[in-house]
Image (spheres, grey):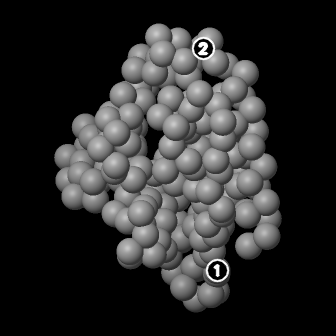
């Protein structure tokens, strides 16, 4: 499971392109907000890339069910830890979904820092001013947190918060070193 920062709409394609072809994370399927699947042209593009919808407002465990099923079938998934695009390239608050999913499935996390992709919004400026984009992959984050059978993520809130903090530290280190 690759967990990345997010500052541009094409970030999933950039992460996918940067991945080693023969790695366990290739091909990777990213989750996207359900509303993008209601836009005809956008829907066709993101579905062609293997993106799957996440429904918000139905509780964390319910919204993660499609991702859980994919992970059970050994499909690599990608998530953006900030939950939405950061408009100016600054890191936003990290959301607990990635940590919760990792705890629920026992899946290790590959931290990914994308830097500079927000500058692509103005393609001419990006090309002519020779702006840089960097994609940095960190070491897998293994953890010992588990979600006992028949327990909820709410009951495991402390573990989710600790793992979210660890993910945040690793991604920030990568982000500031590239």
Quadrant assignment for the C terminus: bottom right
Left/right placement of residue 45 relative to residue 117 reads: left
What x and y, as percent, mark residue 1? 49, 50
Residue at position x 65%, y 62% in the image: 139
Q: Position of residue 80 (x, y in %)?
A: 54, 47
Where in the figure is residue 155, as x and y percent of width and height?
A: 62, 12
| For residue 18, side relative to residue 118 (left or right) | left
Residue lying at 79% horizontally and 60% vertically, measured from the top left: 173
Q: Sort mark 2 into few (<14), some (14-19) or many (20+) by Cα contacts within 10 Å.
A: few
**Which residue is more in the foreground, 159 or 121?**
159
What numbered label is drawn on residue 132? 1
Q: Are marks 2 and 1 in contact (CB under 8 Å)?
A: no
Q: Residues within 10 Å of mark 1 (few under 14, many from 20)?
A: few
The residue lying toward the viewer, choosing from 38 and 142, is 142
Residue in the image at 52% along x and 54% along y: 2
Q: Residue at x 53, y 12 (%)?
A: 151
Q: From the viewer's perspective, is residue 16 above or below residue 99?
A: below
Q: Say which element carries label 1.
A: loop
Circle nearer the N terminus (2, 1): 1
- Numbered marks: total: 2
The quarter holding residue 156 reads top right
Q: Who is closer to the viewer here, 153 or 78?
A: 153
Q: CA distance from mark 2 to mark 1?
A: 41 Å
For label 2, the SS is helix
Residue behind mark 2: 154
């Amino acid at each position: 499971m690759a967990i990345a920062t997010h500052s541009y709409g094409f970030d999933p394609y950039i992460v996918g392109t940067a991945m080693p072809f023969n790695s366990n994370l290739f091909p990777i399927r990213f989750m996207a907000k359900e509303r993008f699947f209601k836009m005809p042209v956008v829907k066709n593009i993101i579905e062609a890339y293997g993106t799957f919808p996440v429904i918000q407002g139905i509780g964390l465990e319910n919204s993660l069910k499609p991702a859980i099923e994919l992970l059970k079938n050994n499909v690599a998934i990608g998530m953006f830890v900030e939950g939405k695009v950061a408009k100016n390239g600054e890191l936003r608050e990290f959301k607990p979904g990635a940590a919760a999913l990792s705890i629920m499935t026992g899946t290790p996390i590959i931290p990914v820092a994308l830097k500079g992709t927000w500058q692509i919004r103005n393609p001419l400026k990006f090309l002519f001013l020779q702006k840089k984009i960097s994609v940095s992959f960190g070491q897998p984050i293994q953890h010992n947190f588990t979600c006992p059978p028949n327990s909820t993520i709410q009951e495991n809130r402390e573990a989710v918060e600790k793992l979210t903090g660890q993910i945040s530290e690793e991604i920030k280190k990568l982000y500031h070193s590239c």
